[in-house]
Amino acid sequence: MLQLKSKYDVFRQQINVVIHGTSTKAGRLFDLILLGLILLSVFLVMMETVAGFNQKYHYYLVLLEWIITGLFTIEYILRIISINKPFKYIFSFYGIVDLLAIVPMYLSFFLVGTSILSVIRSLRLLRLFKILNHPQFNGHYLQLKQAIYASKGKIIVFIYFVLISTIIIGSIMYVVEGKQSGFTSIPIGIYWAIVTLTTVGYGDISPITPLGQFIASLVMILGYGIIAVPTGIVTAEIAKRANFKASNPKYPCSECGSDDYPDNANFCPNCGHSLEKK
């Protein structure tokens, strides 16, 4: 015998479709409105730190912040009641971020200045990836993810080489320049080496001896090569995969955009969707 759903169950189902759905118009509209509110909230928090603007419009800034906090609170509660396993969401990464997005304003009742922590809401912009849950975007995402994963061994070795290099260079500069040039310790020397290798060049510490300047010149030249290496590793892997796929063409999954599956597969190993043979 069929059991009729209660009005509450129907409400939960409708809310679930709107909040968690990415393929429906209502779900996409909800996500766009949510991201708009997040951007507005972050903008308001930033403008609150501008003394002149805050002094002139403080009342309106606080009012808008409370309105947005109220909307986020309602959204947080709806997310909890719309799923079958609420604790799984509450203790998930997004669940914790969503909670942190509303807590600071309520804490401002008891602790002065905590409302500024509302800038944590910027983390909710990560939900942009949910909106981009489209086969075309997913396909590019998977290609980049696979290329980086395949290159991880080379990248780890490269990072290890850079780490050792900065320690050696920092130690040498500490010995060559000494405390009179600002190299008061080996960690300070390592800091200078990292800043120089990355071509940032703050200029707060600089060598003054001819030998130190010569070493610094070599480090600067080495820095340009170091910046290019990780990009080259990943780019080569992407090109390798692109050439392989060009000689072994496959139709991407219509659901997630992945084309990384065996030739005889009937279902996508990434999302489980049926593969359409053309």
Image (cartoon, grey):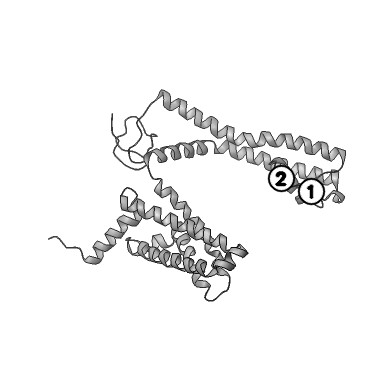
Q: 105 and 257: which one is in front? A: 105
Q: Quadrant of residue 92?
A: bottom left
Q: Amino acid at mark 2?
A: Val
Toward the viewer: 196 or 276? 196
- Rendered image: mark on residue 195: 2
226 to the left or right of 250: right
Pointer 1 residue: 205
195 left or right of 259 in image: right
Is residue 92 visible from the viewing direction of this image? Answer: no
Q: Position of residue 234 (x, y in %)?
A: 55, 34
Report the front residue among 237 and 15.
15
- Name the residue: 54% across, 36% down: 151
Label 1 crowding class (10 Å Cα cut-off): few <14, some 14-19, many 20+?
A: some
Q: Quadrant of the N terminus?
A: bottom left
State which tag comes first along the sequence, 2 or 1: 2
Q: Position of residue 179 (x, y in %)?
A: 85, 51
What residue is shown at x 50% (from left), y 28% (from top)? Answer: 239
Farthest residue to the left: give it: 1
Q: Residue furthest bottom?
A: 110
Q: Dividing the picture into quarters, in which one does residue 171 lie? A: top right
| Residue 222, visible in the rendered structure | yes
